[in-house]
Image (cartoon, rainbow, N blue to C red):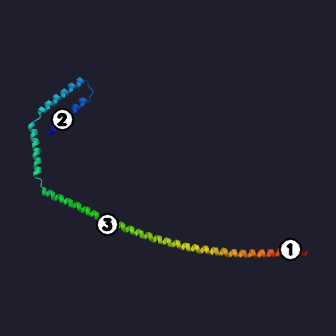
Amino acid sequence: MKKRNAFFLGALVGAAAVALFTPKSGQEMQKELLQKLEDLQSKIKDIEVDEVKAAFTAKLDDVKDVINNFDWETSKAELEVKVNEVKAKLNEMMARLDEAKDNIKDQAELAQEDLEENFTIVIDTVKEHAKDIAEDVKTRVSNVSDDAKVIASDVADEVKKATSDVVDIAMKKEDK
């Protein structure tokens, strides 16, 4: 019954759409619409009202049966079970989250300790190299100082010799 009514309604809508969207003169469209309405009236006359009432009443009785036979206690118990399952899963997820948080905290602390240790090693190495460089600079400065003293002494000796030579030459010229 339901399929038949749906078919008739679909046919009517389809016919109206074709009639309205097909380019035709006003008289042609009016004539076609009147024909479609007559066809619809004859199809409506064929519909059995008692069948429609019986189908509708049967559906209402089915709905009443579902409502009357609905077991509220069982449904409530099933719902409580589902809620408890969801709570358990949430608790499990929270426990995993706490565990992950603790693991991350532990890893961060280990990384911090490693960094501190590595920085200490680097700082100690830099200090050691700085001491070595300072000693090397002192040694080089001392060597340069010693070399400068030797050179200054040599220059002083040369200046004395040159001065002595100049004095000797000046004396010889005076004597002449």
Q: Amino acid at mark 2?
A: Leu
Direction right: furthest residue: 176
Q: Image quadrant of residue 90?
A: bottom left
Query: Residue 132 location, x and y as percent?
Result: 57, 74
Q: Which residue is mark 2?
A: 9
Q: Amino acid at mark 3?
A: Glu
Where is 77 relative to 33, above or below?
below
Closer to us: mark 1 or mark 3? 1
Query: Residue 110 location, x and y as percent?
Result: 40, 69
> 118 or 41: nearer the eye?
118
Q: Residue at x 88, y 75 (%)?
A: 172
| Label 1: which secondary element | helix
Whichever of callouts 1 and 2 sits on the residue coming sooner in the sequence is: 2
Badge 1 vs badge 3, beta-carbon distance below 8 Å: no
Judge the density around disc 2: few (<14), some (14-19), many (≥20) Cα neighbours within 10 Å: few
| Label 2: which secondary element | helix
What numbered label is drawn on residue 99? 3
Query: Residue 152 location, x and y as percent?
Result: 72, 74
Q: Is residue 137 left or right of residue 39?
A: right
Badge 1 vs badge 2, beta-carbon distance below 8 Å: no
Q: Is residue 138 left or right of residue 82?
A: right
Where is 134 relative to 80, above or below?
below
Q: Residue at x 14, y 30 (%)?
A: 41
Q: Which residue is mark 1?
A: 170
Whichever of callouts 2 and 3 sits on the residue coming sooner in the sequence is: 2
Q: CA distance from mark 2 to mark 3?
A: 64 Å
Closer to us: mark 1 or mark 2? 1
Q: Is residue 132 left or right of residue 101?
A: right
User: What is the quadrant of the N terminus in the image?
Assistant: top left
